[in-house]
Image (tube, helix red, strand yellow):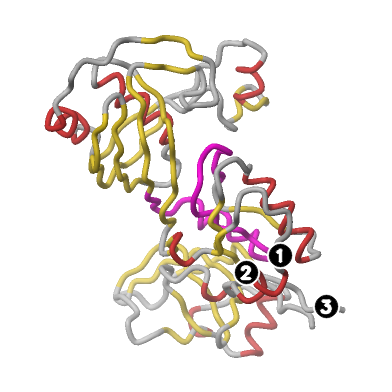
Amino acid sequence: MAKALDGIILIDKPEGESSFSVVRRLRKTLKIRKAGHAGTLDPFASGLLVMLLGQGTKLSTYLMGQVKSYRATVRLGIETDTMDPTGRIVRSRPVPALEPDDIREKAQRFEGNIEQVPPAFSALKLKGKRAYALARMGIPVALKKRRVTIHSLEIVSVDLPDFTFLVTCSGGTYIRSLAADLGKAMGTGGHLKALRRLSSGPFSVKEALKLEKGDPVLSQSALEQTIIPLGDALPGMIGAQVDDRTAEKIRNGYQPQWQDLQKASSWPDFYEGNMKLMTGTALVAILKARWDSRMPEGWLRVVRVFHEPSS
């Protein structure tokens, strides 16, 4: 039996290919069933896709919520029903000779915690159906506002009717909605003309395996060489070690106690949140944890278990 492939792969997706198409190609090339991604990119967009393999699919929740950065271009004066270049034009306006400094000043107002309405053409569910399915049938879609964080937004070029910006934002931010809102702020309306994801959490597109548009074949050896093991897939999450015997018990349903853990020297005096449990370099489990050094003990709860891969 072939060794199980568990972990993540960083892919630089080309324009013109769907995220699910990349998933299918990985499944076929690596001959695996379980594969997914930690945050989709629309077909017109390019850039970093964090692909999940085998038990790596259990990391989706933790990877999707990480901070992301993008390079995006807004086309002013044209609004589309999808808020991107694939949609139907719903409104056109002339674009005046806006000053770059004025564009920058208005764009800076979007930094910080903001509310945005997700696009009608999105995968969010409304009354049990995908919003995009309802929108395609002509059914009005009214999605609720959500709070997101724009950590930084920098205008890097202005070539009217277009302008390009770099943005770093919280997970769950819709750049299409941000582009449409920026267009409204400029007084002309607009849509997202181009998008490239540059990073997701600690991972950069510079580290990714680049796919070429229309390339029908992925190299199995190239893919396997770029797999990031489960234990390295969450570098920003605090961790603790357990011995092999305790790891086996946890994999068989045991709920560990604080005395089972070997905490690192950098362990904080107080901590509450997710924690990864390791034995050596292997990921054993993800826990919900609370620790306060002033108290005799905190609490732990196993939320994900990762079995030792078979050879």
As drawn, is 281 to the left or to the right of 195?
A: right
Tag 1 and tag 3, C-beta contact below 8 Å: no
As drawn, is 159 to the left or to the right of 301?
A: left
Q: Earlier in the sequence, mark 3 or mark 2?
A: 3
Residue at figure coordinates x 59%, y 66% from the top left: 302
Amino acid at dot 1: Gly
Amino acid at dot 3: Ala
Amino acid at dot 2: Gly
Which residue in the structure is indicated by mark 3? 2
10 Å crowding of disc 2: few (<14), some (14-19), many (20+):
many
Report how far apart the C-alphas of labels 1 and 3 lie in the structure. Answer: 13 Å
Which residue in the structure is indicated by mark 1? 54
Residue sitting nearer the eye, 80 or 38: 80
Residue sitting nearer the eye, 103 or 58: 103
Residue sitting nearer the eye, 149 or 244: 149
Magenta stretch bounds: 40-69
10 Å crowding of disc 1: few (<14), some (14-19), many (20+):
some
Report how far apart the C-alphas of labels 2 and 1 lie in the structure. Answer: 7 Å
10 Å crowding of disc 3: few (<14), some (14-19), many (20+):
few
Which residue in the structure is indicated by mark 2? 7
Q: Earlier in the sequence, mark 2 or mark 1?
A: 2
Residue sitting nearer the eye, 162 or 260: 162
Q: Earlier in the sequence, mark 1 or mark 3?
A: 3
Tag 2 and tag 1, C-beta contact below 8 Å: yes
Q: In x, y percent, where is residue 67?
A: 39, 52
**Secondary structure at numbered mark 3:** loop
- Whether 43 is drawn above or below 47: the answer is above
